Amino acid sequence: MFTGIVETFGKLIALKAEKENLHLTIASNFTSELKIDQSVAHNGVCLTVVEISNNTYTVTAIKETLEKTNLNTLKVGDLINLERGMKVGDRLDGHIVQGHVDQTAICKSISETNGSWEYTFSYNSALNNITIEKGSITINGVSLTVVNSKRDQFSVCIIPYTYEHTNFKNFEVGTVVNLEFDVIGKYVSRLTEFGLK
């Protein structure tokens, strides 16, 4: 379980394909605190630490993960948003995030306002994921509030701190991002789909 509050960046050091899997080796400033089998969210994707060496660690993404997330677009040198699992008793400063990406979205526009940035994303609404105005959304592992909610797109506003401390600062029009929709909204949507009220 995560909160969507990014702890730090990781720098992608190496990519290694093995059959249908992809091993990602990452350098981070909390590597020395990690343990084998620990879960870490990478751009919002929960992956298990399988190897640790000095200041780098390795995780493995399987075919299912690569098909549903933006991990297959990463290049050596890219910065990745990282968050370790929350501790029981910690404050939930973001919202409940599972680290299970629902689908990807594409950045359609970026506008700088007076002291913040507004990003608009479009996604495939055929997968029946929804946003609501002022609801929660996780983008590349970052807990954010939805504005301008529409059937297949939405916007978020980014304050300077979030801009500087996440990989939002590297986004461009066309950037593919990971989305995890609000877990409560997903259950309500599913129940409605089956006619349970």
Image (spheres, rainbow, N blue to C red):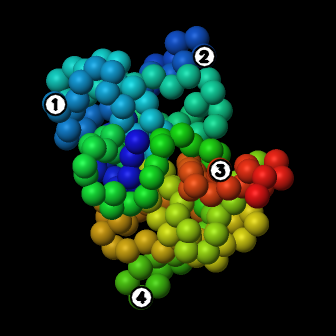
**Residue where numbered disc 3 is placed:** 187
Q: Is residue 79 visible?
A: no
Q: Secondary structure at mark 1?
A: helix
Measure the alpha-carbon separation of dots 2 and 1.
Answer: 29 Å
- Specify whether residue 45 is in view: yes
Q: Which quadrant would the C terminus be assigned to in this image?
A: bottom right
Residue 113, placed above or below residue 29: below
- Local secondary structure at mark 4: loop
Mark-to-mark CA distance, 3 and 1: 37 Å
Residue carrying label 4: 114
Residue that carries the numbered disc 2 in the rendered image: 20
Amino acid type, residue under disc 2 in the picture = Glu
Q: Nearer the viewer, residue 41 or 71?
A: 41
At a point 22% along the width and 29% down the height, the residue shown is 34
Which amino acid type corresponds to the residue marked 4 in the rendered image? Answer: Asn
Choose the circle earlier in sequence order: 2 or 3: 2
**Residue 54's disc number:** none
The 10 Å Cα crowd at callout 2, few under 14, some 14 to 19, many 20 or more, is few
Q: Position of residue 126 (x, y in %)?
A: 81, 51
Q: Residues within 10 Å of mark 3 (few under 14, many from 20)?
A: few
Of pointers 1 and 4, the one earlier in the residue sequence = 1
Give the crowd class for mark 4: few <14, some 14-19, many >=20 residues within 10 Å: few
Mark 2: which secondary structure?
loop
Query: Residue, x 43% and y 58% (percent of image)?
Result: 95
Which callout, 4 or 2, points at the residue further toward the start of the chain?
2
